[in-house]
Image: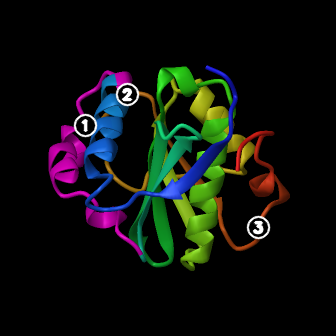
Amino acid sequence: MTNSTTTIRPARFPEDAATLRELFRLYAQGLGVDLGFQDFEAELAGLPGKYAPPEGAALLAESAGGMVLGCVAMRPLGNGTCEMKRLFLRPEARGLGLGRVLAQAIVAAARAAGYRRMVLDTLATMTGALSVYRGLGFAETAPYYHNPLAGAVFLALDLAAPSERDRQPPEGVT
């Protein structure tokens, strides 16, 4: 896949619901674990659900040709905190810096929505994602919910002050 211009845009509902559902399913398949403890099927059935604006968001990375390459979402947790969820790229879109761009975009959306803190959980085996998160300033934090999966890692980012690293998309990405 060539590194053509990619646009990050909000998912539109109901138009993008099937696409987002597909990407979320691919995300879960890639993890190779059962997400039943997160009520994953109910989340899919109820999209946009907690990802609905203005408290939530679902963003899509779309190629110049209109192919949706990946997604990321955010939902409210309360007390000025939101959670980043479902950062995913199709295999052909990996290695182009789009994961970082999507993560930057959802962090910017969280700041714009007035959140003071963003949290997420991932698995220790997700080394590429961990590198992106840490590169954006996320640091390990105490678990904020019960995740029964071995190797779960909890991260948090203070959204109070924007970081310069949040504003640096790779070349060719808008």
Look at label 1 and name its amino acid: Leu
Q: Residue at x 61, y 20 (%)?
A: 1
Observer-nearest residue: 142 or 66? Answer: 66
Separation of marks 2 and 3 at Cα, in angstroms: 32 Å
Q: Residue at x 66, y 46 (%)?
A: 101
Residue segment shown in magenta: 30-53
Q: Of label 1 and label 3, which has the lower sequence position?
A: 1
Separation of marks 2 and 1 at Cα, in angstroms: 13 Å
Which dot marks residue 150? 2
Which dot marks residue 35? 1
* Label 1 CA crowd tier, 10 Å (few <14, some 14–19, many 20+): some
Determine the image quadrant of residue 107: bottom right
Observer-nearest residue: 40 or 141? Answer: 40
Q: Of label 2 and label 3, which has the lower sequence position?
A: 2
Q: Residue at x 69, y 34 (%)?
A: 97
**Residue receiving disc 3:** 162
Look at label 3 and name its amino acid: Pro
Name the mark nearer the viewer: 2 or 3.
3
Q: Mark 1 near mark 3, Cβ–Cβ under 8 Å?
A: no
x, y percent for residue 22: 29, 36
x, y percent for residue 165: 81, 52
Determine the image quadrant of residue 14: bottom left
Q: Secondary structure at mark 3?
A: loop
Q: Residue at x 56, y 68 (%)?
A: 110
| Whether residue 139 can be seen here | no
Q: Is residue 149 magenta?
A: no
Residue lying farthest to the right in this orientation: 164
Which dot marks residue 133? none
